[in-house]
Amino acid sequence: MATVRRIKLGSQGLEVSAQGFGCAGMSVLQYGPPKPEAEMISLIHHAINSGITLFDTSESYGPHSNEILLGKALKGGMRERVELATKFGVSIVDGKMEIRASD
């Protein structure tokens, strides 16, 4: 199995895989219907077992359904093996993206 190179982020010692995993395609409706949950959890596990440690999600990927999916996939000790990146201040209101910086 190929090894995923690791890199340091910032000056606090955080080290992650050089290749990240963008989760938007799993649940953002603009990319098509949501994918089967069991298949997406299996894909997340495969990525982790292959050395991917940086996962990108957002409240707006669903909304909320992407973070719920990732939470289900990271149960049972998987959470300790990854770092999560998320975006904030973006909401979907009446089907339109809205930027908020007050929350």
Image (cartoon, grey):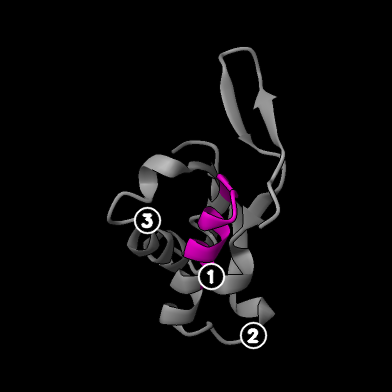
Q: Is residue 54 magenta?
A: yes
Q: Which of the image's four quarters has the C terminus?
A: top left
The front one of 12 and 32 is: 12
- Secondary structure under badge 1? helix
Q: Amino acid at mark 3?
A: Leu
Name the residue rendered at 63%, 12% in the picture.
11
Give x and y (percent) for residue 25: 63, 71
Is disc 3 surrounded by few (<14), some (14 to 19) or many (20+) residues within 10 Å? some
Is disc 2 surrounded by few (<14), some (14 to 19) or many (20+) residues within 10 Å? few
Give x and y (percent) for residue 70: 43, 60
Region of the chain picked out in magenta, as a range: 43-55
Name the residue rendered at 66%, 78% in the picture.
30
CB atoms at circles 2 and 1 under 8 Å apart? no
Q: Can residue 95 be seen from the camera position used here?
A: no
Q: Amino acid at mark 1?
A: Leu
Name the residue rendered at 30%, 56% in the picture.
75
Say the numbered circle drawn on residue 32.
Answer: 2
Q: Amino acid at mark 2?
A: Gly
Q: Is residue 39 magenta?
A: no
